[in-house]
Image (cartoon, rainbow, N blue to C red):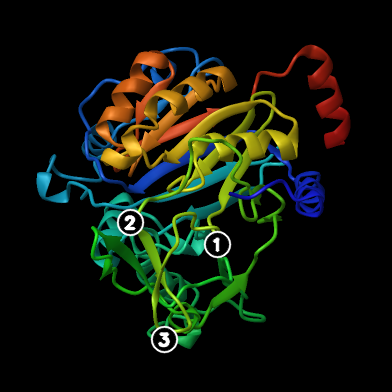
Amino acid sequence: MSELDPQEIAIARAAWSRLRAVERLTVTVIVDNETDGLSSPCACCDPSLDPNTSTPYQSEFTWATHQVASGKWPDLDFRRSLLAGHGLSLLLSVTTSDGSVHRLLFDGGPREDLWSINAERLGVDLAGVGAAVLSHWHVDHSVGLLAVARAASAARATNPDQPEAELPPGPEPVMEPFVFDLHPARPARRGLLLGSSQKPVPFNVDPTLEQLSLPGCRVELHASPHTLLGNCFFVSGSIPRLTSFETGQPGHATLGADGKWHLDPYIMEERYLAVRVRGRGVVVFSGCSHAGIVNVVQNVKEVSSEHVFGVVGGLHLAGSKMEVRIPETVAALREIDPDRVFGGHCTGRRAKAALVAAFPDRFQPLSVGGTYTFLAAPLGEEQKAEAAVEGQ
């Protein structure tokens, strides 16, 4: 367990003070464990309701039918269906009050082909995406970043087949490098120590920094809280572990510098990402919540002193040794009282059922291809006048 570090909290609050409130946040699920394009949304995500009070949701199936209706696709071809897999990758797009748009990837999922197939079918263009943040060094979040690196590098390369006469006059346009925002504590390898024998069961290997450092890409290592992309996204440092029941992942192990496997239940390099939506509060993204989602949300509140509007991502409440934490986790989340809880990846069916019961109009599972739109609160007359003055 770890305690609050006053110096780390001060650094986090200083970074948070730079975080801008955005007018619009759109979340597109590129990779998740679940595919479900047919289920109707929960009440808070119903697109037919007032967008000023709801978080409009579009399923993969609805999106696909729009492709046909608009003439982009000739038919509803199920061979274009998105693929599910054990992992997480989210595309976040924010719009600020001055109309600026910033896009960021949160994690890359477990496989290169899975990320590439889904991203291509969704029309994701990394020329318009500025960075990828890796929540923690686990292969179900990191390996897909290899495909991201190749796509980002290609998007930033000059097309060698373009005739020189077709190039616009003047200096060649310079595109900002694609940033991989990573925690420096990359382990040699991770896995599990199972049973009384404690025999190691290793995972495959995370990408190396060199593999991600392709032309047009830049690796940045951050252990401390910071903001990025126009101060629109906040990335935490290590998350304090304060609750009594969120005690890490049993049996999890890391290969040490001594060549031996060591139990490592806490996965201390895990980070969360947060966005401020004007007039709503904070939307927090957690890749796996190895720190415990209650610890994550409590840290957001400690750093920001703001209302947590949304909780999105993997809550890691699946598996017999994790499921015993569901009642205390759900009870704590009810006390925190977020307006939206969108759980996916490692949340697990039992936890999802408990969350539906606790938040019947506020919980929805993530699903590949799903898009959620968080809109800022409507401006009052006084706020409109202030905004007009600021815009002059």
Q: Which residue lies under the disc numbered 1?
A: 131
* Whether residue 80 is situated above or below residue 145 in the rendered picture: above
| Residue 350 in the image, given as x and y percentages of width and height | 27, 28
Q: Secondary structure at mark 3?
A: loop
Q: Quadrant of the C terminus?
A: top right
Query: Residue at the spot x=44%, y=18% of the render?
Result: 362
Q: Which residue lies under the disc numbered 2?
A: 119
Q: Quadrant of residue 19?
A: top right
Upstream in sequence: badge 3 or badge 2: 2
Toward the viewer: 84 or 238? Answer: 238
Left or right position of 120 against 186: left
* Whether residue 275 is situated above or below residue 127 in the rendered picture: above
Q: Amino acid at mark 3?
A: Pro
State the separation of the CA atoms marked 3 and 1.
25 Å
Upstream in sequence: badge 3 or badge 1: 1
Q: Amino acid at mark 2?
A: Ala
Answer whether labels 3 and 2 touch (C-beta < 8 Å): no
Within 10 Å of the Cα at label 3, are there few (<14), some (14-19), or many (20+) other Cα atoms?
few
| Residue 88 in the image, given as x and y percentages of width and height | 36, 51
Left or right position of 10 against 76: right
Query: Residue at the spot x=70%, y=60% of the render?
Result: 224
State the separation of the CA atoms marked 2 and 1.
15 Å
Callout in the foreground (3, 2): 2
Q: Secondary structure at mark 1?
A: strand
Q: Which residue lies under the disc numbered 3?
A: 160
| Residue 151 visible at all | no
Q: Amino acid at mark 1?
A: Ala
| Residue 275 in the image, given as x and y percentages of width and height | 62, 40
| Residue 5 visible at all | yes
Q: Secondary structure at mark 2?
A: helix
